[in-house]
Image (cartoon, helix red, strand yellow):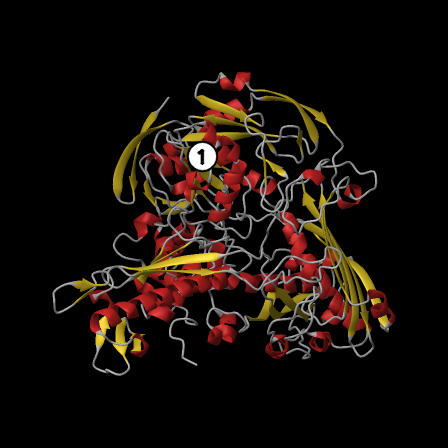
Amino acid sequence: MTQLKFVGESPSRIDGLEKITGAANYVDDLAFGPNLLHAEIVESPHAHALIMSIDTTAAEKVPGVVRVVTGKDFPYRFGLYMQDRFVFPTDRVRFVGEQVAAVVARDPKTAKRAAKLVKVVYKELEPVLDLAEALRDDAVLVHPDIGNYTRCPWFFPRAGTNIAHWRKTRKGDIEQGFKGADVIFEDTYTVPRYAHCAIEPHVIVGLYDLAGRLTLWSASQSPYTQRNVFAQALAPLGLSHKDIRVVTPYIGGGFGGKAGVSMEIIGAALAAMVKGQPVKVRWSRAQEFYNTYQRQGVIARIKLGVKKDGTVTAIEHTLHWDAGGYCEYGANVVNAVGLSATGPYRIPNVKIDSVCVYTNLPPGGPYRGFGYSEFHFGLESHMTRVAQRIGMDPVEFRRKNAICEGDTLAYGAKMNPSGLHEAIDRVAAEIRWGKKEISRDPNKVIGKGFACFWKAPAMPPNAASAAFVKFNEDGSLNISASGMEIGQGYMTVMAQIAAEILTVPVHRIRIEPPDTDRNAYEWQTVGSHVTWGCGNAVKAAALDVREKMFAVVERALGLSRDTLYLEAEKVKCRVKPDFELPFRDFVISGIQTPHGNFIGGPILGSGVFMPEFTSALSDPETSQGGHPNVHYTVGAAAATLEVEAEGREWMRPRLEEKLQAQAGRHGGVFPQSGRKAWHRRQEPMRLRSALGVVELVVGHALPFVCGNQFWPAVW
Amino acid sequence: MKKRITLKLNGETRSLEVEPNDILLDVLRESLGVKSPKIGCERGDCGACTVLLDDKTVRSCLILAIEADGCHITTAEGLGRDGLTPLQRSFLEHGSFQCGFCAPGVVVSATELLEKNPHPSEAEIKEALGGNLCRCTGYKPIIAAIVAVGQKAGRRV
């Protein structure tokens, strides 16, 4: 197998210079001139209320106000997986802070002043503020017409309830599984809601020009998905995909919070209302907390059956998710967990119920980990406690049940190459598991925690990636794809992949943030899938370029393409060692023949990637039959902590942390790169999410779950 | 009523009229076209708008523009004009930033720290950067880069 030259190295980030000099532009940094309008949102003060009337007259009279927009102007629903959201609700509000109107004015101060003059009359309804209330038989309904919403085929809402989606997974015989167990242990784990807190607030600028062209400059992880959702939502205005352009410059943190479409729909709608003038909607820090996607809270009940020798016989995992007022994206988090809540373990009998429940709280949605961190907290805590009950070492217990390649997953498909055992052993060795450590401070004790994890990208089976690669006159390259550089190092990684095929070094490759008019398609930058999905598209485009280079050399110089190869930015020939043709000599201008004419021309290639082996079609009662997840990444992590032995000192320094994730060889961009990738800088997000699980298990959430008592097994 | 102010921005004298209640951050970004100070929280919490005002870091979202009349203001744009500073080079080498939104503010705060204390300890760096939030990195590569600059500059006596 050929040695990799660029993939696996840690070059300087190619976006680094822009970011440390202040040159990097984010949406709010772009200049739109003195004609730029500013919007202020009129927000609901109620969690649940009917909108009886909206009077905009006083606001419209304020000098400098250009337009006041309400649900009457936009009575349309939208959503990524289920169209349950409103641009501006027309009949009722479902959380405090929901937008009911917007004032567009010449300057932000005028917009703010006028927004206070919009008079909205509400009729308050009883709010549904927690899961227990939401699930009562006589519960107040947050979405009375949920049964009629347009949705993707793998969502199963229950009409007449607050249940937006219920993912059921059944494998084996759960009753027999528990009958065969020597010990059955059951408990409940709770994880609260989180806010993303990206330092850059959500912001969008929209311009609907006088020719009917709608351009959006958006702080987004999902330029193409935004365009698609905008096109669906704005279709009644006669706009289609070709009329809409989404430009996404650098983004100041995403973490899932800027995936899909949340507040950005307001920017698109307002732009359509003030034709010819750009309008900006920028969220305040407060709005970041109450009117963007939050991580959904969850109450998880776990029942685990084990034999005395540590073999897990059955798991029943029931998760109720507080999805908030809208869950057009959040319900897919619930779905992902419903397929994977066994964790990375070989368990023959499985019953998972992952239930998405509407409440009158801010909308839930994607958040780093996409549900996996939340269920791993409960499951990994439970694994440690069960090990303790049967008198087994928690690491040995995990090793005994760790999933292997070829094992049957909860939904019936086979596990991809795993490497979990290797990860467990390596992390256990690194953390010196089993060696008791004594603090120098007699008032403190040192403990160790250990957890396993897995993660699969949650994506529809047709989530595609595409890329263009083109040469410049000097033989440098431009890559044009639509992944987002959300900080994970996407640009550098794509350059490394193209470099590997074309031998052009990373510092001679430029890759720009997306523009849906110019860059190739990408579904979204979510689920830690871009290095793989977009990377495979870039690789395919680079291979296409290479083939075109060989074809030109063959036609112009008569060298068989089978004998040609690339090395150090030159085309070389196996049977003619003295032949070398630098890229810069022909990749734009072609190759001159003895007759004076030129063969070839500018070389550019394209590539696509689609996970063609996946399918979301399965039995809704069991989830058997499909292949919804492309692959799982597995791993183990451990941490050592020092804390006060007595008292309630919960501010504990982290002494040490170890982690290994197995990237796996299956389906990688370069098969030989698989196991190397785990510690590279370019994928820090997933690694730190995993460490977060360990922190949760041994640290932060412990006092809330266990009433301020440690589990001896942790120590 | 507008008031004329004059300040030295990244070495260049600039003069303009501002409202008495105009915030320095907004004036820098919208009237003077300097975009590296970012709007993150508008209440002094996140540090993304940090600039040097007469060589001291301030949150430009908490300062009125008229207060800066007659002052020297330095932003990230003004630091690397004649090539990267050793601090910026170290940030680059350490891959200190991910999304980069907090970077201009961190660069400014760390520049002030190294001016006052060329060999800061890790604890001193954490103290100096306490007002700059970063959501991506967990701070480790930022701190490592500043420590490295201090070490390269020679040992503490």
Compared to residue A330, the image places residue A243 above or below, namely above
Query: Outermost residue toward the left?
Result: A595
Q: Nearer the viewer, residue A501 or A280?
A: A501
Q: Nearer the viewer, residue A480 or B14?
A: A480
Compared to residue A451, the image places residue A280 above or below, namely above
Confirm whether residue B97 shows in the render: no
Q: Three-letter amino acid code at disc 1?
A: Lys
Query: Split into 4 quadrants, where in the image is the N terminus of chain A?
Result: bottom left
Q: Which residue is mark 1?
A: A280
Q: Nearer the viewer, residue B116 or A280?
A: A280
Confirm whether residue A196 shows in the render: yes
In what element is the residue under mark 1? strand
Report the residue at 54% width, 43% height from top: A261
Taking the image as shown, residue A280 lies to the left or right of residue B12, namely right
Report the residue at 29% width, 70% height from top: A550
* Image position, residue A342 (x, y; %): 71, 65
* Image position, residue A151 (x, y; %): 64, 45
Q: Residues within 10 Å of mark 1 (few under 14, many from 20)?
A: many
* Image position, residue A26 (x, y; %): 41, 46
Query: Split into 4 quadrants, where in the image is the C terminus of chain A?
Result: bottom right
Specify the quadrant of the image occupied by residue A29.
Answer: top left
Report the residue at 48% width, 36% height from top: A268
**How many numbered marks does the figure carry?**
1
Q: Chain of mark 1?
A: A
Specify the quadrant of the image occupied by residue A217.
Answer: top left
* Image position, residue A594 (x, y; %): 12, 69
